[in-house]
Amino acid sequence: MTDTFLVSDSESLTYPELDKKKNDLIQRLGKPKPVLLEADRNINTVVRFLSLIEGGHTVLMVPSWDFKDAEFRAQLKQLSQTDFLPWGMASELPEGEAKTFHSLIRKGLENKSGRFLVRTSGSSGKFKLVLHDPELFFRKYKLIGKHFERTFFFSPADSIAGVETILEAYSHRASVAFVSGKISPALVAQTLKSQSVDYFQTTPTFLNLMMLSGVFRTEKPEKLLKIAFGSEPAQASVLSHIKEKWSEVSLLQTYGMSEIGIQKTLFTDDPVYFHLDEKHNPGRIKNGLLEISSLTPLVAYLNFDSQITSDGWFMTHDEVREKGKQLSVPGREGELLNIAGRKFFPSEVEEFLMKVSGILDVIVRAEKDEFAGTILHAEIFIDPEVSETEMRKKLKDFLGASVPPHMHPQKITIGTELPQNGRFKKMRKA
Amino acid sequence: MNHNEIVTKIIAASFQRANNEIPGFEATPSPELPMFDVPGAILDSLNLITFVFILEDEIKKATGLKVKITTEDVLNNSESPFRSVQGISDFLLRKVRND
């Protein structure tokens, strides 16, 4: 059993240090409250998050661009019917006083039952808030058992996969290696090696980038035993390449959603498919769509109708293909995108782009690309008095300043004629 | 198309476009400029994809060829061509000649 909880090339946190920090913080946090936490893959985020849920608080982690955005906070208050108190970086405590509470949040706080929320996109353009009970996750990890000594903090801390990385390692007193700042294939490969990571959870697109960078042609990190990726299928050629070069590493496709967490899957002959472990989280297919009985279902949405059937199965709305008991998800209903571990709809990007003066209409589409997975293609229709060069410059500045990086379109085409079925967003904007 | 033409017609045009289109991208091409996944690289995982599309577009403009860059051969290359401008131009020369 390791004593180290979190480790990077420049810092680390042991379990005794975590316990001390956590106990101090729980004392100072006092009465349970709803808290908004700026999330990053670092020691502070993890310590604050664990202290909050153990102290009976309800916590929502968000990336820094939302944490600092007053418009986002106003929308959060409206959709959650709750005053989330932002974590004060100077005071090292949540700041302000909460007066408005959603009934489900109030109940959790009164019972001192720690809860966390995960935000996911809604087709209306408004995000959905998913309330979770961490105890269910701890029970799941106990049932599944410990399957790694050290993993890598790949998914953003505010995503369900990021939260599970923290909770699963913590529940088994395993450890998590992380890197500060942006992740790149070479940096990840170096960390897998230098920090003796044995379990690496990533995405198919990142596996492509690792292959492009020649990572799999280098010596396999000595301790690495398993690479998991989800939820989209990876390219068969990339998986064959990994198997050929790093033959001792097992490849596993996982399946997860913000509402039900990461499901336990079994190894398959063909890792392009995933195989739900029926003992822990059986699946069934109704009208071509996958339903799952999860060990970690959401408590509820704060602002959306339940998607759980009367007999307790979560309706994923994912169309699946079957190969015996193995499944694959060719695409998600409703164009939900998953880029850099964050899910959103093209309409959310359209909303951003319509703020640029000189744009008359925008259509953002998801396109499939063999290498990049899903890419965003924005077709932009501009005022004929604005030149294309001028518009591209404006877009570059606007995207850099106001739009989260994962929502930047990879392809932008610009025209001056509205399509016949144009949605006349200029009118909507006014 | 020779190496010099690749650099002047495709790489230079792609950099000009990237300077106008990719947030945070401000660069002048030079052979050893670190591009992706090396220390000091000017592209991250997300904007590498945009840069690849720009390159494909500029190849089409310069040669009339519709070239897909990220095919299995690039993924299987012993060294990523995207580490430097030199790597990209060498790779494009092979690619354009083969296509």
Image (tube, rainbow, N blue to C red):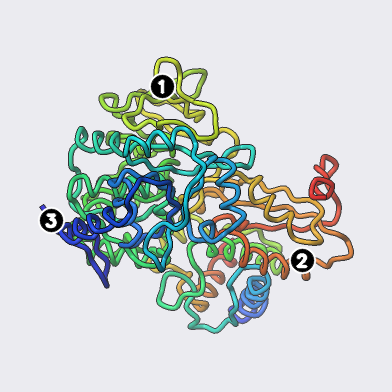
| Mark 2 / mark 3, whichever is N-terminal | 3
In this figure, which residue is indicated by the disc labeled 1? A313
Instruction: Measure the C-alpha gap from mark 2 to mark 3.
Output: 55 Å
Query: Mark 3 falls on what kind of element?
Result: loop
- B80, A97: nearer the viewer: A97
Label 1 crowd bin: few (<14), some (14–19), many (20+), radius 10 Å: some
The answer to whether the residue labelled 3 contacts the one labelled 1, judged by CB atoms less than 8 Å apart, is: no
Query: Mark 2 falls on what kind of element?
Result: helix
- A227, A180: nearer the viewer: A180
Q: Position of residue A365 (x, y in %)?
A: 66, 46
Please report, as a chain letter, where disc 3 is located.
Answer: A
The tag on residue A2 is 3
Mark 3 is on which residue type?
Thr
- A281, B91: nearer the viewer: A281
Q: Position of residue A42 (x, y in %)?
A: 34, 62
Label 2 crowd bin: few (<14), some (14–19), many (20+), radius 10 Å: many
